[in-house]
Amino acid sequence: MLTAENQLSHWIVRISYYVLVLGITLAAAYTISVLIVPIVLGFLLSYMLQPIVNRLERMGISRHLGSMLVLGLLLGTIGLALRVSYPKLSRQFTDFKSHDHLYLTMLESKAQALASSLSDHLPKDLVEESYASAQNHLIQEVKRYKTLLPEMLSHFLSALIMMLFAPVVAFFFLAEGSQIKKFLVSLVPNRYFEMSLMILHRIDLQLGSYLRGQLLDCLAIGVLAAIGLSILNVKYALFIGAFAGLANVIPYVGPVAGAIPGMLVLMISPNATFPWWSVAVMFVIIKAIDDVFIYPSTVGKSLHLHPLLVILGILAGEHFGGVLGMLIVIPLMGIIKAVVEVLHNTLRSYRII
Amino acid sequence: MELKQENPIWTYLFRRKVDRQSSIYLTLQKVPLFNGISNNELELIRRKLHIRHYRADELIFREDEAGCGMYIVEKGAVRITGKNQSGQEVEYAILGEGEFFGELALVTSSPRKASAFSTQKTTLMGFFEPDLQELIEKHPHLGSKILFQLSRVLGSRLDAMNNRVILLQSQLEGSTNADS
């Protein structure tokens, strides 16, 4: 039996312990929130590289060494690719910056021509009003990006340092992933631990195939678009190809958004070899190749989202986070759907719901 | 005091861990599923095992629930029960150290056929389908050995079940002949 005094000191020790644990957890959560981008990136990177490290492990190479080799090879390749393509990329970038005024005026004259041809068929007031509002919107956007660009560049160095943290995170997830999972499961009470193990395993499988599929699909589209645009002699083919690959994450809107910059560049290029619509035709062909050959073998039916849900998601993403929101929302919805589906099925099979 | 002088300090630091590991190896070697598996391979399995501690009379899993793997009794004892036709709880077996249960869930997704409770303070080692899949993927040689042993265990269970069915059939035929 504890005396009243002993009981009091027992409670003081207990409360101090919980306060300490809470403090450490909050401090850790704050640190993690600062580093959330490299942590998420590292996590995604580890998902992408997992099959290669597994294969190396099967060949008898330890998981730590395999993870180091794969990450080293990847970083080396990226470094080499940047080293090789940097002069071209930087030339394209400075060329674009020095010509942006010219492009803007050319775009404006093209738009004016379009508006005047439209006013022959549509009410003049309506065309003028729409033209003025579109012009305002465009000027505002250009201004925004012109202030955003130097700001982005000034943050580039700190972002680069932060990004270097991502491979470190990826290394630990790759090398110690199953130990981390085992540790997490060990914290769950006996009654729910088997179920938690199954939930983690299924989420891991679903997410892995979805994220790897998406990345491969984007990569394929990006490469195809860059090759196609180079064939059509479109300026900034690499940038536009990369953008098209990235935009491909957004269903329906992505392929169209990916084609627009290419069409605009051809439209305002004074000595373009091909008409602007050739880019549209090329993107239609790429979309067909993607739908028939690439998508079924990469993403497949691993995570089918209803079209209405996708459209609502894109609108919500645009509302909350602009273009970045649109890019993030679909993979995020995919992740949430995978988690909810697995949770629902597993909880039902364990007769908890 | 003499003992302390004889042994270097690191043996005291690591002794508990080493003792614990060798106890796990000894238990694993008794499990038919891991017959013919080398010590190095046993180490790979040991790393996958989930060690769980149960109080006396604690539920491990319930009949008709989903399950994803088997348990090996390291310490203590486990009571396996099920419901008979009238819905009453019937005891099927009491399992002791080195014995295992729930292995069917490693290969099927059907619900658990019985319930399991600890009868005293018990330590179990869990080996589950995701762990088996990982072993098959990363160490196919070891994975195929475990799968072979698992099919042997399940085959012998099927054999025993067949014998029981034949026995019951003959008993049934005998009773119908006697009635007529």
Image (cartoon, grey):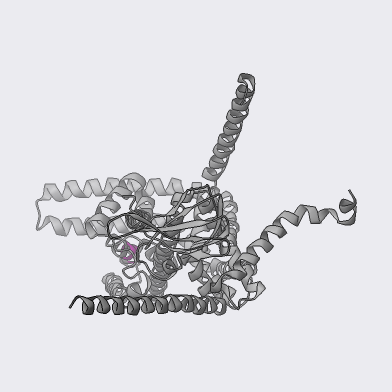
| Whether residue B63 is situated above or below residue B36 in the rendered picture | above
- Side (left or right) of A98 relative to A103: right
Q: Nearer the viewer, residue B37 or A88?
A: B37
Image quarter (top left, top right, bottom left or bottom right) of the C terminus of chain B: bottom left
- Side (left or right) of A100 relative to B145: left
The residue stretch that appears in magenta: A257-262
Q: Quadrant of residue A115?
A: bottom left
How far across and how far down the image is residue A225, in percent?
A: 38, 72
Q: Quadrant of residue A310?
A: bottom left
What residue lies at 24% left-to-right and 59% top-to-bottom? A306
Magenta stretch mostly in which secondary structure?
Answer: helix
What residue lies at 53% left-to-right and 52% top-to-bottom? A186
How far across and how far down the image is residue A60, in percent?
A: 62, 76
What residue lies at 84% left-to-right and 53% top-to-bottom? B9
Queried whether the magenta region covers residue A258, the answer comes back as yes
Q: Nearer the viewer, residue A99 or A145?
A: A145
- Side (left or right) of B178 relative to B154: left
> Residue B135: in sight, yes or no?
yes
How far across and how far down the image is residue B56, in percent?
A: 51, 47
